[in-house]
Image (tube, helix red, strand yellow):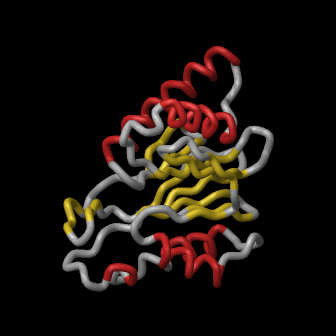
Amino acid sequence: LGFVFKEGVLIAVDSRASMGSYIGSNSVKKVIEINPYLLGTMAGGAADCQFWERNLSRQCRLWELREKRRISVAAASKLLANVMWHYRGYGLSMGTMVAGWDQDGDPNLYYVDSDGMRLKHHLFSVGSGSTFAYGVLDTEYKWDISVEQAVKLGKKPFGTPPTAMRTRAEPSTCTLCFATAGSRNSAAT
């Protein structure tokens, strides 16, 4: 899940890779650092997400070298959406969030999927636990919360033990990443 709040943007992910009721791993890194100011998340096919977000990281670096300034969240998400649009219908499986804090002072959050769809909003949840996470966000999200309150809200859908996945034998880890004005990405597990 991801949401924008007055002090930045927060991304919260679990570490479980699953397909239906089969759990392949409980230690997947689902947040990919695109650059020190941009984060991408993984939902869908792990290989598709990792490959295309690493490709986005390379494209962003080339853009920054060419333009001599940091790429915005909007521009980075548009680069990814354009590539996905080109490859739609090829069987890719990807639903990702691109989040970060722009140089001009605003936190941003975009959703990009493998069909090339790109949406901007103040909150998103993707993946198998997204309906539960949306339930928590719909009832408790507010724009004017502090970093501490945002961290607490980000952890809530994952619970201890994981509320969304009570029937699973092993708990997964919840990773929280956030970007605030003028800072690089921060992570906590």
Q: Position of residue 60 (x, y in %)?
A: 57, 28
Question: Which corner quadrant of the image does residue 92 belong to?
Answer: top left
Judged left or right of residue 32, residue 181 is right
Q: Residue at x 67, y 76 (%)?
A: 141
In the rendered view, would you say 84 is above or below 63? Answer: below
Q: Residue at x 48, y 55 (%)?
A: 187
In the rendered view, would you say 3 is above or below 53? Answer: below
Quadrant (top left/top right/bottom left/bottom right) for the C terminus: bottom left
Q: Residue at x 40, y 44 (%)?
A: 49
Q: 10 or 17: nearer the eye?
A: 17
Q: How many circles with numbers are drawn on the protein?
A: 0
Judged left or right of residue 53, residue 7 is right
Q: Residue at x 76, y 49 (%)?
A: 106
In the rendered view, would you say 138 is above or below 14? Answer: below
Q: Position of residue 163 (x, y in %)?
A: 39, 84
Q: Position of residue 111 (x, y in %)?
A: 58, 52
Query: Most extreme residue toward the front, as rendered?
Result: 89
Q: Position of residue 9 (x, y in %)?
A: 64, 57
Q: 50 or 188: nearer the eye?
A: 50
Query: Most extreme residue toward the top, as rendered?
Result: 66
Q: 82 or 144: nearer the eye?
A: 82
